[in-house]
Image: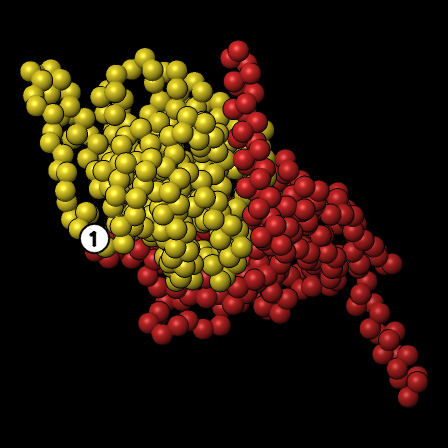
């Protein structure tokens, strides 16, 4: 029995002949008062015990996902001559940010089956279970969600954006826009051979408001009354101070 | 210089905000209006979420009216009694307005509500002002006619619960001022305006208050109603952005000083027609957004439950 297990392990080991070793340009993203988006550089190497297999080219796929949350997608309709929100579909879970970067055309580096299993591309990362009665084309709402977020730079498909050298070193740069949601950004790196995944590496990049931004945001949500009173006080003081300064200047 | 607004969660150019505050400040100094009804739509245009724009603007109005109220109090141009009656109505109205606002927010129709309110009110006020000032200019060119007669006694004087307002020299029922206060409070909560542009004409024509005390008294009411509105929005919606408010305010105060000086050089009728044209332009832009087929038919609700 033990021999059989050892044999199985010995047989299984070569399957994981290639492994990802990863580096990041920054361990966390801090949203400060002057935050205007950020470039995230992801780089790494493929560690292997055996020589490079010659049978199929290596592919690298990276997926960076912001925290998922439900989203309401509303569609406008013309009623009484004006455009109003009419139908709404609740998408159960959609990442607030999602970027996929690959070393080649998606169809070549990743098989459909693997995409389905690991939920790698944008449409796979969104989960929409059912549509309310009266909405027959709920896919249109999901497509609209992807379109709007892609327009804001929140959903990115970067085919061929991963530089792969000598089938060993790889790197990619992903632009994080200014309107990021806070949370842990799940980052996954997939190594593929012939579209089949041979190794997965996973890590998380925390994105947080820091300093004054963090303090104001937390105060506004945890102690809204104190925050409101403080806002009034600061605003009155600033307005009064500015006009007092002006009347001193005029004299 | 880009600045990240902590509550609105968008990154905006700080100088754009200072500039906007400044321009609206110049206009409010020139025309002697609060400017909230111009600022809130402008904030929509630069991409601030309407809920944040309305709540933050309420906060800004408190601050920008504060020094004005102090000046009027010193000159004894505030009818505190009338102001308090208007305020009672205003607080009721603001509470009602926030309830309406939050109900429609849950239904996903708050943008429509805010925009429609703006189109209706800006259209009506701008149109009336335009016609009125055109007429005034024509009258001043031709021979000066008899001044318009004001009715001394209207239905306002027949209502019960009368009260003496010594500063205004009035003995009238408290019902009309309370109703005026309520409607202004609702507007403050839904539109993020002080409501002076509705309250001042109502005080002069409906309540028959002397013009001298109208501005001071309305500012007195506005400051408390908008402060209350700010707190309600802060507590129920978490949409007051203090960074945004302060930036707009600094621009606004500086702009107002410049505007007051320009205002003294222009004629009253010309000023009013300019203001009317501007109000109609903002109204037209908002109306077009509602009437034209939008390029994007779909819209995302914030955080799923917005």
Q: Residue at x 35, y 69 (%)?
A: A135
- Residue A249: percent from left, percent from top: 55, 14
- Residue B154: percent from left, percent from top: 14, 45
The chain letter for the residue carrying disc 1 is: B
Direction from residue A9 to residue A223 in the image, left or right: left
Toward the right, the furthest residue is A2
Q: Is residue B208 above or below residue A127?
A: above
* Callout 1: SS: loop
Q: Colour of chain B?
A: yellow
Give A119 or B74, whichever is nearer the viewer.
Answer: B74
Q: Residue at x 21, y 56 (%)?
A: A80
Which residue is identified by label 1? Answer: B159
Q: Residue at x 17, y 51 (%)?
A: B158
Q: Is residue B254 above or below residue B113?
A: above
Direction from residue A237 to residue A191 in the image, left or right: right
Q: Which chain is the one coloured red?
A: A
- Residue A230: percent from left, percent from top: 60, 44
Give B157 or B68, whichever is nearer the viewer.
Answer: B157
Q: Residue at x 61, y 40 (%)?
A: A37
Q: Quadrant of the N terminus of chain B?
A: top right
Q: Quadrant of residue A184?
A: bottom right
């Amino acid at each position: 029995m033990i021999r059989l297990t050892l044999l199985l392990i010995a047989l299984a080991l070569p399957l994981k002949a290639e492994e990802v070793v990863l580096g990041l340009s920054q361990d966390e993203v801090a949203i400060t008062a002057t935050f205007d988006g950020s470039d995230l550089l992801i780089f790494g190497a493929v560690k292997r015990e055996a020589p490079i297999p010659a049978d199929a080219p290596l592919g690298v796929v990276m997926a960076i996902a912001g925290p998922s949350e439900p989203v309401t997608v509303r569609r406008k309709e013309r009623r009484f001559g004006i455009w109003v929100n009419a139908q709404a579909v609740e998408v159960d879970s959609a990442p607030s940010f999602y970027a996929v970067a690959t070393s080649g055309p998606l169809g070549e580096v990743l098989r459909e089956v693997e995409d389905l299993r690991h939920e790698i591309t944008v449409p796979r990362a969104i989960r929409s279970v059912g549509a309310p009665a009266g909405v027959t084309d709920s896919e249109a709402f999901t497509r609209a969600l992807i379109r709007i977020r892609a327009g804001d730079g929140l959903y990115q498909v970067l085919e061929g954006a991963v530089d792969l050298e000598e089938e060993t070193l790889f790197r990619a740069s992903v632009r994080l826009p200014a309107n990021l949601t806070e949370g842990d950004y799940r980052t996954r790196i997939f190594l593929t051979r012939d579209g089949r995944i041979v190794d997965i590496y996973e890590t998380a990049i925390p994105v947080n408001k820091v300093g004054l931004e963090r303090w104001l945001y937390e105060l506004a949500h945890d102690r809204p009354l104190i925050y409101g009173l403080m806002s009034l006080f600061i605003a009155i003081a600033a307005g009064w101070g500015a006009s007092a300064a002006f009347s001193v200047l005029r004299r | 210089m880009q600045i990240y607004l902590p509550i609105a969660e968008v990154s905006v150019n700080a100088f754009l905000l200072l500039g906007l505050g400044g321009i609206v400040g110049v206009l409010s100094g020139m025309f002697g209006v609060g400017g909230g009804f111009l600022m809130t739509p402008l904030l929509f245009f630069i991409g601030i979420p309407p809920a944040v724009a309305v709540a933050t603007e309420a906060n800004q109005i408190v601050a920008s009216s504060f020094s004005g109220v102090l000046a009027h109090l010193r000159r004894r141009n505030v009818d505190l009694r009338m102001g308090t009656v208007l305020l009672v109505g205003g607080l009721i109205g603001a509470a009602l307005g926030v309830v309406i606002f939050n109900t429609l927010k849950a239904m996903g129709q708050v943008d429509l509500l805010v925009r429609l309110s703006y189109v209706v009110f800006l259209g009506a006020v701008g149109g009336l002002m335009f016609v009125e000032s055109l007429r005034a200019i024509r009258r001043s060119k031709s021979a000066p006619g008899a001044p318009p007669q004001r009715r001394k006694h209207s239905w306002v004087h027949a209502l019960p619960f009368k009260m003496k307002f010594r500063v205004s020299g009035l003995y009238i029922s408290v019902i009309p001022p309370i109703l005026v206060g309520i409607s202004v409070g609702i507007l403050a909560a839904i539109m993020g305006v002080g409501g002076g542009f509705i309250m001042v004409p109502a005080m002069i024509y409906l309540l028959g208050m002397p013009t001298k005390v109208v501005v001071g008294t309305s500012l007195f009411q506005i400051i408390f109603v908008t402060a209350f509105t700010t707190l309600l929005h802060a507590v129920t919606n978490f949409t007051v952005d203090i960074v945004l408010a302060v930036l707009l305010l600094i621009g606004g105060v500086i702009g107002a000083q410049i505007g007051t000086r320009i205002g003294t050089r222009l004629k009253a009728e010309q000023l009013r027609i300019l203001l009317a044209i501007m109000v109609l332009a903002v109204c037209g832009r908002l109306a077009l957004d509602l009437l034209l087929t939008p390029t994007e038919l779909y819209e995302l609700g914030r955080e799923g439950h917005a």
